Amino acid sequence: MLNNEKELLDEISRGNMAVFGTLMKHYSQGVYTLVVRIVSDDCDAEELAQDVWMKVYKQLPMFSGRSAFSTWLYRIAYNAAISHTRRKRQNNISLDERKLAAVGEQELEQMEGDNSEHNIEALTAAIEQLEPQERALVTLHYYEGRSLAECAEITGQSEGTTKVRMYRIRKKLYLLITNNDYEQQSR
């Protein structure tokens, strides 16, 4: 967060739009990262990120300050990217619920504690196989360091729902990684 973010927003509301560039410079990489992780296409992500900034510019007078500016901004980016993926109708992988339920806490801790190059590559590949909303949560929480409460606010879900979804995502990643490892070993 910018130290003088409130002052910058006040300046913009008084008509000083040159200050808008400072906000863009500070948050543009985070917006792009979130969008590209959801849509999985660099060209679409660049275009969507530009659209997000246009929306933010137009809607800035409606920003009430009830949440942090970054939360409001990421919610706009999230909604734009999710809408885009719905229009594109990407094929997603669905996993057997029984397999998902069988993954225990010990397996998750073991996966998360393995920082080997192979595991990191497998994790990155597994994240790409997640549904767009799941990739968004992973990006917001693990890459951007957002709290579960803020992730919930950005995605428009309750905090309880977000916690449950993150737990299921961790299990799904475990299954995707172990299935990929099994497939590679059997070749």
Image (spheres, grey):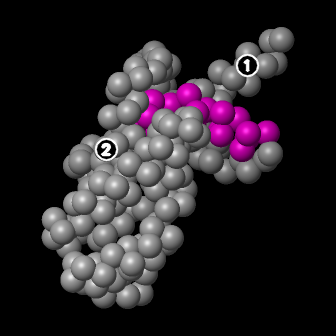
Taking the spot 49% from the left edge, 62% from the top edge, the residue there is 28
Q: Secondary structure at mark 2?
A: helix
**What percent of the width, then of the height, locates residue 32?**
51, 52
**What percent of the width, then of the height, locates residue 8?**
33, 83
Taking the spot 59% from the left edge, 40% from the top edge, the residue there is 42
Check the picture and name the quadrant holding the N terminus: bottom left
Q: Main secondary structure of the magenta part?
A: helix
- Which amino acid type is shown beneath numbered disc 1? Tyr
**Whole-Å distance between the Cαs marked 2 and 1?**
36 Å
Magenta highlight on residue 48: no
Asked whether residue 187 is in view, the answer is yes
Q: Which residue is mark 2?
A: 79
Quick check: marks 2 and 1 in contact, CB under 8 Å? no
The numbered dot on residue 182 is 1
As drawn, 47 above or below 89: below
Q: Secondary structure at mark 1?
A: helix
Question: Could you say which is closer to the camera, residue 35 or residue 175?
Answer: 35
Q: Quadrant of residue 179?
A: top right
Taking the spot 81% from the left edge, 18% from the top edge, the residue there is 185
Magenta highlight on residue 121: yes
What segment carries the magenta color? 118-136
Q: Quadrant of residue 65?
A: bottom left
